[in-house]
Amino acid sequence: MALAGRTAAWWARLPSSRLPSTPLCLPPWLSAACGRLYSSGGKEKLDMSTYPVESIRNFSIIAHVDHGKSTLADRLLEITGTIAKTDRNKQVLDKLQVERERGITVKAQSASLFYNHGGVNYLLNLIDTPGHVDFSYEVSRSLSACQGVILVVDANEGIQAQTVANFYLAFEAQLAIIPVINKIDLKNADPERVEKQIEKLFDIPIHECVRISAKQGTNVEKVLQKVIEKIPPPQCNTADPLKALVFDSTFDHYRGVIANIALFGGEIQKGHKIVSAHTKKRYEVNEVGILTPNEQPTHKLYAGQVGYLVAGMKEVTEAQIGDTLFLYKQPVEPLPGFKSAKPMVFAGMYPVDQTEYNNLKSALERLTLNDSSVTVHRDSSLALGAGWRLGFLGLLHMEVFNQRLEQEYNMSVILTAPTVPYKAVLSSAKLIKEYGKAEITIINPAQFPDKLSVSEYLEPTVLGTIVTPHEYIGKIIVLCQDRRAVQKDMLYIDEHRVMLKYLFPLNEIVVDFYDALKSLSSGYASFDYEDAGYQAADLIKMDILLNGNPVEELSTIIHNDKAYATGKFLCERLKDAIPRQLFEIAIQAAIGKKIIARETLKAYRKNVVAKCYGGDITRRMKLLKRQAEGKKLMRKIGNVEVPRDAFIRVLKRQTDK
């Protein structure tokens, strides 16, 4: 690969007079490398000085899952001529394979649009954001580079939980909000009802709502006009010193780190010497440009504009999201950056083969550069060897991260059962001295301290918002009570929809609450949550034993009231997940020395008495006794292997349990 890059670079440097007149038949590897070089260097550079700050609009599209954000983004790209109008334009900005497969947006993607309105050319910087609660960190990051948002609401579904959460994110950031009611072409669409909901919940007048069909392109042009009229231009000046915020970044094997930047002052061009406020390292700018949505090099980027920058950053640690870039010898006050994401779910990640450890480490570093909400800590396990304990924003986030590792980096990993971070208030002076503090955070069940040395355990809680049609209220209240939730509020949005607020222990909702809620409400209820601190709880550590040997990866911290039911359930699921052996396997759930549940996985048996036709009974007994002794010996020396996918399957609870 390195040879391909060097050879391609040599061809690219040749003057046109020395290039052969007839087409060359190059090998595929060299042809691809040359293509990459020519495609990056051959584009005509744009002059961005024709777009002063007054004619720039930076905005995001925010909404609940599947309300039509990416489809609206496609139509906006088509109307402004950024992409050609074809039938194949479906979720153009969803570039990741995982996004295409699941039909959801995982990464916020930006694109620059050029639009003429009232005889003035405008530069519109659009950011398409994810809608799922697990990716709300992407939304909050995107809003930092914007002055306004388009809030999309489905005309059929109405306001959902994530619509409310995203509205308040934009409201707290003091951004201009344009309400858009999408999917008015659907048979069951009721835009009048949705307009009343928006007015009641968000205090936005009905006449400000724009009714559109993003799929058919109806009224979408009006959205662009509203963006220009309602969203203010950025407050910055080209004459100020350079101040650029890094709000996203990706890694390219050939060019190093590509940083997405928003300019809050000054200008930047190729050849400028810049400094990172975070690392204090100095770089020379190799390329600047805008995303349309593909990379389009420009001569310069000016204050108020959003684009990308390549500056020869070779290490993934050098491009911190939230970092401020400024010109060498012209230091500025760093921008506040981003509040670091608070992980809600922790899981152990280990390479299948320990020889792959360094490759997995490199893949993790590059993927966490692109997804900075994941926290990484070194960890090790007796059974699985060296690995990491990763913190995610939710279970879907964890599954998507694992899928991206496999698809983008060809890495196969073992993921242990997800857990949440607990706290323990220590009472033992010896332990307080050892840890250096009285309150410790437990992210791995192996670190769970003994009850004798702890004054109280604390579990994380979240404030959950459920929006549902009123006919499902009874079932949902029963589900919430079963999950130890406390009702805080209940509000009728209109005559058909209700908003419930509950205080949940995070452990109760992290694995399958969303699935249970969807199945109870025929898919109509929506759920969103936010952190609500810690509360005291009666917690215990439950171990799973296989033939008396604890399986460290299946240990869980659980509330005392749920210990017996969960232990019995885990044993039953393990019985289904573990393949039968030639010896009997005892699957047990234990709290300390006390066994609270047991399942027995029967051994495969050969019929050793098949050859006995009649004869004395003692002959049969002798053969059976010899077989039993062999099985007993096998059980002593035999190892039970838990299949790799058993960890998530074992923890996934069923709604009827």
Image (tube, rainbow, N blue to C red):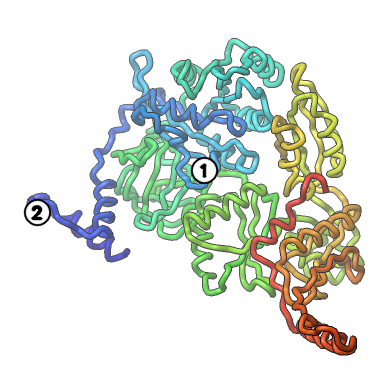
In this orientation, which residue lies closer to the viewer: 449 or 211? 211
Q: Nearer the viewer, mark 2 or mark 1?
A: 1
> Is 398 above or below relative to 173?
below
Q: Quadrant of residue 348?
A: bottom right
**Element carrying mark 2:** loop
- Mark 1: which secondary structure? helix
Q: Is residue 507 left or right of residue 454?
A: left
Image point (46%, 31%), residue name: 126
Residue at image point 79% right, 24% down: 470
Q: Is residue 515 visible?
A: yes
**Residue 364 in the figure: left or right of residue 347:** left
Q: Which residue carries the number 1 mark?
A: 99
Question: Counting other residues with Cα less than 10 Å from the Cα at mark 2, is it few (<14), some (14-19), or many (20 or more)?
Answer: few
Mark 2 and mark 1: Cα distance apart in space: 43 Å
Relative to the observer, which residue lies in front, 282 or 72?
Answer: 72
Count of marks, rendered view: 2
Task: Residue 175 in the image: state x and y as whole percent.
Answer: 57, 27
**Residue 170: image x %, image y %?**
60, 30
Q: Quadrant of residue 63?
A: top right
The residue most toward the front is 614
Q: Nearer the viewer, residue 530 or 635?
A: 635
Task: Give percent across and percent down for residue 367.
Answer: 51, 55
Q: Is residue 215 above or below residue 13?
A: above
Residue at the spot of label 2: 20
Task: Tell me the amino acid under the disc marked 1.
Answer: Glu
Question: Quarter holding the N terminus?
Answer: bottom left
Q: Is residue 381 left or right of residue 84?
A: right
What is the three-letter code of the residue carrying label 2? Pro
Task: Looking at the picture, tell me which residue is in the foreground, 414 or 630.
Answer: 630
Q: Is residue 235 visible?
A: no
